[in-house]
Amino acid sequence: MAPSTPLLTVRGSEGLYMVNGPPHFTESTVFPRESGKNCKTCTFSKDGTLFAWGNGEKINVINVTNKGQLHSFDLPKAVCLEFSPKNTVLATWQPYTTSKDDTAGIPNLQLYDVKTGTCLKSFIQKKMQNWCPSWSEDETLCARNVNNEVHFFENNNFNTFANKLHLKKINDFVLSPGPQPYKVAVYVPGSKGAPSFVRLYQYPNFDGPHAALANKSFFKADKVTMLWNKKATAVLVIASTDVDKTGASYYGEQTLHYIATNGESAVVQLPKNGPIYDVVWNSSSTEFCAVYGFMPAKATIFNLKCDPVFDFGTGPRNAAYYSPHGHILVLAGFGNLRGQMEVWDVKNYKLISKPVASDSTYFAWCPDGEHILTATCAPRLRVNNGYKIWHYTGSVLHKYDVPSNAELWQVSWQPFLDGIFPEKAITYQAVPSDVPSEEPKVATAYRPPALRNKPVTNSKLHEEEPPQNMKPQPGNEKPLSKTALKNQRKHEAKKAAKQEARSDKSPDMAPTPAPQSTPRNTLSQSTSGDPEIDKKIKNLKKKLKAIEQLKEQAATGKQLEKNQVTLSRLPLSLLLSSTLRSPSVEWKIY
């Protein structure tokens, strides 16, 4: 039977232990504290019933429900652990090494049967990146990237692969979530002037020119991130370059692409230039949120047509996190930002709270959809390590600060399957807390001695743009509701359609330009029809323009030459007569 609240795993220089979730926050008896600094890795299974950790000597596996130890594997160098979705297989990875004679490498990726403890298969996996095989949710399918091929194994039979997808220079792949039919997205980087591309396939249909469900090619991509939605109907692709050749950003260039399994694809048009910091799908699979643009960054929700649904304006943010139920969205600024968070009700587009988690390097939603974990961990930051548990209304319910001579390495929630915790109604009133509130320290700007006794003038480097429903409307200063926003968009669309229809009916009715003030001594723009006369008029215009320039130069005090002074004082009548009589007359203009 699952506990009422998830456990919290804490790993650091003080050891490895578990803490009961809200509302108690006491050390749990499910897992006896593992003291020492040798714990390199730990992980829960997908449903939270199994827990595995390494203590520098062995990899141990326990059942969290009945507190019983299942297995212990002699793997002192293992640094990565992962359970398969249905807890059938435990995958372990340790750094790649070669044998003494350097003839062959030693297999460093082991797959163990969780029930029996036997090793099912060992592979050589040199890189730590993408080390773990990818399983389908029912474990019918398992895939690995091996030398420009994706090998597929069925029913956890790793002795031989059942199918393979071969494309030249496959760099990465992502298996779709959800039940059958299984889909896979593959990325092939461009070379020799050819573009990079991402293709979607349905297993096992990989052969033939029309086997791909969808294809999207693009330039400017040194690496990509592929994100499936929960229903496996579409993929978001963030294409990134390491260097921005325009010099506008240190982060390179990023573009966001949308690819659907029905063959549709598009480039997501982002209204503000700059890096793409984060993109995340809602659990409903019908919309996604992107955080992008030079600071202060914009955040926008898009639908499956890649049209903006709601604009959150600009702010100090670089990350977005949907709650497990998809009804709350947190926009946050971590890393080199101050840790400001905005908690939004995305059904009504209403701001719930604006807490500040200074110096945070980690954020995670609790599976119950009500509580938030923020932490400051080493080695990202080696000072002020600790973690906080918040309610989404902004109240800090629990806080733990690591001693100054210790470090915190990892904090994580115990996961649960979807549906264990029901969605609750959103509340906007801050819940009570026993933890005293801390006012964030506001750093004052440096003022030179000459200005310290003078009044402070408020100045901003950037004007922050308010959210879409908080922008002042003509004649209506109140924020618009979701229904009002929808009606406003309909009204604007109808108005645009009417204007387009009018322009189609009367294409010749163009607005007359406003009369412009013409300089003195100018001639009519109309032509006479005689090419010879038109040529003389053109020459006359050039001379008039030159005279005007000479008069402006003389007015500014510039010394003119004798012939220039004569020309600037020439009467218009004489100029007209000389030009019309003798078109070959040339005036020397300096």
Image (tube, rainbow, N blue to C red):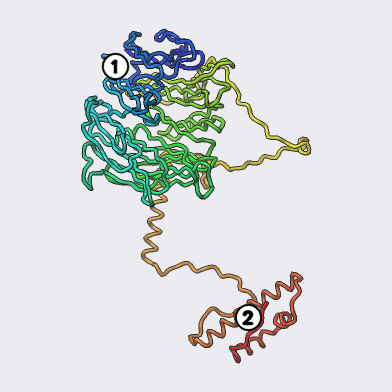
Query: Could you tell me if residue 468 is visible in this image?
Result: no
Query: For residue 56, which quarter of the picture?
Result: top left
Residue 96 x %, y %: 39, 26
Query: For residue 553, which quarter of the picture?
Result: bottom right
Q: Residue at x 67, y 32 (%)?
A: 444
What residue type is disc 2 on? Lys
User: Distance between the Cα atoms at labels 1 and 2?
Assistant: 95 Å
Residue 246 x %, y %: 52, 50
Q: Is residue 202 above or below residue 411?
A: below
Which of the labelled discs sits on residue 543, or is there none?
2
What residue type is disc 1 on? Val
Q: Looking at the image, which residue sits at the far bottom?
A: 581
Q: Identify the mark nearer the N-term, 1 or 2.
A: 1
In-image side of 323 versus 381 (left or right): left
Q: In the image shown, does 403 or 430 lie closer to the viewer?
A: 403
Q: Are marks 1 and 2 in contact (CB under 8 Å)?
A: no
Residue beneath label 1, please?
114
Mark 1 Cα shell of 10 Å, populated few (<14), some (14-19), many (≥20): some
Residue 145 x %, y %: 31, 34
